[in-house]
Image (spheres, rainbow, N blue to C red):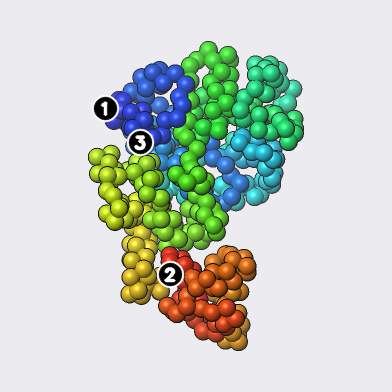
């Protein structure tokens, strides 16, 4: 794609929508983006699915691609072999090459839903392809000499690990991430690294390494690490992580996560997690009280449709509306299977609720004791047994369809 108003404005688009937390040489980057550029985003390969926390990065690089820039998703298969200390207080578990390969395929399938990989418009690379081939002596001589240990230890990325104990392997992480940027600059003329604000120091180290070795200017842009207005970590619920993989988090539960967005976050999340024009975002953000439910519905629909497709979003929306109105919808509610003989014999209600909703036995007893547990619309009593298929409800919003399995 040739230079156009679209490419010239992408920095402003990201800025207006809330993606720009910090940028190295913001004026220079804004000018550079007037022409198509290549950028990369590092992706953690420690699970076979991305999660809601990663969705911010996906949206950011999708905006770049829509503006005509080439996106590289760089899976940290090499760096995952030693662990990333960024924002961590303990050492991250080390993965085997086989685990990383499996996870990479899962990530590829998800990214292909969000990004266009045709004609080289987006690439998915694994830094193990070059990091595992490095000669250590040559690496120290050619790369390590450009880094000051004093400067590295003053970076926020390492401060959180110093008290708990920072090992030598982790200390090398900044060098390896900087080398990734240098490698991509040399091989693919990648000039911009993007990521979360916890990667700021590592990204700047890459800029500095390229300046020292190639005498060229490159750029870094980082987005904020998000939390909800109440301080909860983005993408975390009482039942755990909200995954993009439908087998880990059902489209219905995914939809429910977004429709239950806190009032104060709705406009911000519409700007960050949808492609709706900002005029529409502001219009929805100005809704108040009961009308704000419509803004949440739009948010939930848009994000679910982007991740799982319009049909899954439609089913989730219809199921949600039907369940909450009492008009049915059980056929699309998240299912929980119980062995047919076990169910027929009767399962203590507190055990079934705990297992179906991913809660503890204690929590299940408490919600039953408080009158917040229902089976087919009837309040469940402590000590009750459930011996047939039923639609369970935990509180006002959480449903599970119990079904037997042979």
Image position of 136 with respect to 92: above or below: above
Callout 1: SS: helix
Q: Which mark is residue 333?
A: 2
Residue 127 located left or right of residue 60? right
Disc 2: CA contacts within 10 A as few (<14), some (14-19) or many (>=20): many
The x and y percentages for residue 197 are: 51, 32
Label 1 vs 3, first from the N-terminus: 1
Give the number of the disc on residue 89: none
Whether residue 306 is visible: no
As drawn, is 316 to the left or to the right of 359? left
| Mark 3 residue crowding within 10 angstroms, few (<14) / some (14–19) / many (20+) | many
Check residue 17 in the rendering and tell me which mark sits there, or answer none: 3
Q: Are marks 2 and 1 in contact (CB under 8 Å)?
A: no
Residue at the location (50% across, 38% down)? Answer: 225
Q: Earlier in the sequence, mark 2 or mark 1?
A: 1
- Residue under label 1, please give it: 5
User: Along the line of sight, which residue is nearer the eye, 211 or 224?
Assistant: 224
For this view, does 375 lie left or right of residue 163?
Answer: left
Which is more toward the observer, 175 or 90? 90
Give me the residue at 25% from left, 44% from top.
283
Q: Position of residue 74 (x, y in %)?
A: 53, 37
The C terminus sits in image quarter: bottom right
Mark 3 lies on a secondary structure that is helix
């Amino acid at each position: 794609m040739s230079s156009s108003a679209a490419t010239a404005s992408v920095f402003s688009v990201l800025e207006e929508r809330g993606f720009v937390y910090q940028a190295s040489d913001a004026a220079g980057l804004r000018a550079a983006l007037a022409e198509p550029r290549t950028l990369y985003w590092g992706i953690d390969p420690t699970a076979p699915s991305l999660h809601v926390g990663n969705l911010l990065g996906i949206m950011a690089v999708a905006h770049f691609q829509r503006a005509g820039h080439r996106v590289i998703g760089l899976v940290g298969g090499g760096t995952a072999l030693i662990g990333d200390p960024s924002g961590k207080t303990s050492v991250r578990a080390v993965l085997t090459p086989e685990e990383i390969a499996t996870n990479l395929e899962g990530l590829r399938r998800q990214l292909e839903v969000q990004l266009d990989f045709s004609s080289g418009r987006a690439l998915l690379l694994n830094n193990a392809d070059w990091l595992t081939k490095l000669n250590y002596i040559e690496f120290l001589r050619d790369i390590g000499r450009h880094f000051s240990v004093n400067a590295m230890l003053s970076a926020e990325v390492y401060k959180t690990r110093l008290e708990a104990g920072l090992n030598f392997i982790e200390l090398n992480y900044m060098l390896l991430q900087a080398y990734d940027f240098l490698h991509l600059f040399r091989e693919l003329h990648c000039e911009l690294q993007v990521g979360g604000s916890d990667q700021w120091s590592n990204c700047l180290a890459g800029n500095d390494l390229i300046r020292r070795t190639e005498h060229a200017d490159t750029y870094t842009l980082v987005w904020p690490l998000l939390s909800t207005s109440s301080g909860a970590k983005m993408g975390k619920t009482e039942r755990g992580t909200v995954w993009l993989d439908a087998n880990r988090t059902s489209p219905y539960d995914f939809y429910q996560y977004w429709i239950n967005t806190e009032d104060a976050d709705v406009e911000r999340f519409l700007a960050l997690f949808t492609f709706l024009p900002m005029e529409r975002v502001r219009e929805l953000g100005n809704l108040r009280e009961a009308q704000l439910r419509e803004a949440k519905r739009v948010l939930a629909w848009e994000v679910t449709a982007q991740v799982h497709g319009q049909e899954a979003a439609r089913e989730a929306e219809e199921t949600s509306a039907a369940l909450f109105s009492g008009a049915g919808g059980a056929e699309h509610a998240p299912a929980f299977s119980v062995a047919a003989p076990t169910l027929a014999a009767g399962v203590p209600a507190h055990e079934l609720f705990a297992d179906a909703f991913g809660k503890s036995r204690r929590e299940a007893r408490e919600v039953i004791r408080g009158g917040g547990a229902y089976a087919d619309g009837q309040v469940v009593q402590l000590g009750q047994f459930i011996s047939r298929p039923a639609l369970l409800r935990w509180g006002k919003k959480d449903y599970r369809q119990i079904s037997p399995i042979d």
